Image (tube, rainbow, N blue to C red):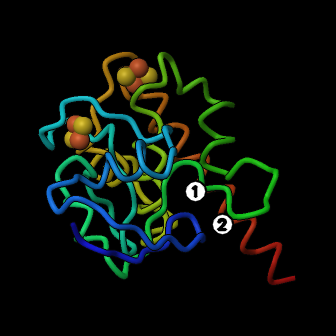
Amino acid sequence: MKKINLKINGSEYSLEIDENMRLIDLIRDVVGLTGTKEGCGEGECGACTVIMGGVTVNSCMVLAFQANGKEILTIEGVKGKGNDKLHPIQKAFLEEGAVQCGFCIPGMVLSAKALLDENNTPSREEIREGISGNLCRCTGYNKIVDAIEKAAYYLVKEAEDNEI
Ligand code: FES
Ligand code: FES
C-alpha cells in the first residue's frame, strides 16, 4: 500500500492505495467521479482523458501513485468549483449538437480545454490535432471541431469582457 496526497477538482485527498492501482480506478471507484470513462483500457481511445498537472493524460495508463502531489481535473471539475454554469466548452458542445452517445465527450472536453488553455485561437487543423488522441465513433468529428471553435470564441470574448 502507498499513501498519496493529491487534489482532484480543487478538493484535497489523502488516500492509501494499492501501488498497482490505475489513476482511472482511483478517480472512478475510490473518489466516485464516474464522468471519466473507460473505453479501451490500453491508451488508444482517450475516453479516460483527465488533466494532470496541466497536461492531458490517459488515466488508464497512469498509476495512481504517479498522481501524488499533483492536481487533477476531471469532467466534474471543468466548470469550476461552486460554479453553476456550464463551462463555455460544454455549452458550445451542446449548442453545436456535438454529442451523440456521449461516451467520448468527457475526454474530448478535457482535451479541448488543455488545447484552449495553450492556444485560444486555434485553427481547425490545430483543433483536430488537439483531439487526435480522442476517438469518437458517432459524430464524424466535424461538429466537435465546430464546438471547439465556438468555445474558443466564447473564451476570448469572456476574457475581453473581464478586462473591461
Ligand atoms: S480507456 Fe484509456 S485510452 Fe482508452
Ligand atoms: S459521441 Fe459517441 S463516441 Fe463520441
In x, y percent, where is residue 163? Answer: 80, 83
* Quadrant occupied by the N terminus: bottom left
Q: Where 162 falls versus 37 (above or below)?
A: below
Left or right for 39, reference 19: right
In x, y percent, where is residue 22? Answer: 23, 52
Q: Quick check: which quadrant has ligand 2?
A: top left
Specify few, some or many for label 2: CA neighbours under 10 Å numbering under 14, 14-19, or 20 or more. some
Residue at screen point 81% across, 77% down: 162
Q: Which three-letter amino acid code belongs to the residue tagged 1?
A: Ala
Q: Where 119 falls versus 45 (above or below)?
A: below
Specify few, some or many for label 1: CA neighbours under 10 Å numbering under 14, 14-19, or 20 or more. many
Q: Where 102 falls versus 83 (above or below)?
A: above
Answer yes or no: disc 1 within 8 Å of ligand 2.
Answer: no
In x, y percent, where is residue 77? Answer: 60, 57
Residue lying at the far right of the rendered structure: 164
> Relative to the observer, which residue lies in front, 16 or 49?
16
Residue at screen point 20% across, 58% down: 62
Secondary structure under the numbered disc 1 in the rendered image? helix
Q: Which residue is mark 2?
A: 156
Q: Where 145 falls versus 58 (above or below)?
A: above
Q: Which residue is mark 1?
A: 152
Q: Are marks 1 and 2 in contact (CB under 8 Å)?
A: yes
Residue at screen point 25% across, 51% down: 58
